[in-house]
Image (cartoon, grey):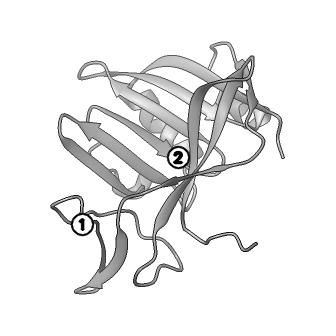
Amino acid sequence: MQTAGYTIKIKLTQDEFYCLLKSVFVPKTYLLAQQGDSIKFINFNINNMPDLLKTGRIFNADYEIRYEKLDDENYGIMVFSEQKEKIKKLNLLDKLEKYDLSEEDDNIFLWGKAKQKNGKWIFVETQIPQILEYPEIEGLTDGKELVIKAINYKKDELPCFTRFKGVEVYVPKSN
């Protein structure tokens, strides 16, 4: 397991930001975006660019990119990766900041249990009075739960950031 993670903070124009997204896109990339009370959590596809809303996270096993739309043309960006060489290949000129990593990935549970309705997966949680929608995940079956795989970036043993790495069907560990 990696012992260090790296971040870069930078301001990019919309065109530069889209070029960055193209350079890090791989299958199993996800978008979690928010604006006001609107939340979007979907499979991200660079070839079918979704509305990014005001703030969000685009993440996969190699990177997380957090963004905030500053105005019509500019974004504040923070890039996370455990692979220093991959971050250097992005050619972002700002200084890399190094963090220690938590010792293993965390599971962040998403609300609801899966149910297929009209060929589409929905998630039902009795405590929330609405249907929840999450990205399509391989291996999902009725009644299963999803988790976000995450790792903590730390300084002096204190967590500073939690980087999202992917979404999986939850499988309990056997004793």
Residue drawn at point x = 64 percent, y = 15 percent: 93
**Towards the viewer: 115 or 95:** 115
- Residue 59: numbered disc: 2
Neighbour tally class for label 1: few under 14, some 14-19, many 20 plus, Cα within 10 Å? few
Residue 87, compared with residue 168, is above or below; it is above
Q: Nearer the viewer, mark 1 or mark 2?
A: 1
Indicate the position of residue 167 as horizontal and vertical percent values: 52, 59
Q: Position of residue 85 (x, y in %)?
A: 79, 34
Q: Which mark is residue 102?
A: none
Gap between marks 1 and 2, in whole Å?
28 Å
- Residue at the top extreme of this rendering: 95
User: Taking 166 as reference, is 34 left or right?
Assistant: left
Q: Amino acid at mark 1?
A: Thr
Quarter assignment of residue 130: bottom left
Q: What residue sits 72% from the left and 74% below the top?
A: 174
Circle 2: is it few (<14), some (14-19), or many (20+) Cα within 10 Å?
Answer: many
Which corner quadrant of the image does residue 135 belong to? bottom left
Local SS, label 1: loop
**Does 6 sit above or below residue 39?**
above
- Which residue corresponds to mark 1? 126
| Residue drawn at point x = 61 percent, y = 42 percent | 63
Q: Are marks 1 and 2 in contact (CB under 8 Å)?
A: no
Amino acid at dot 2:
Phe
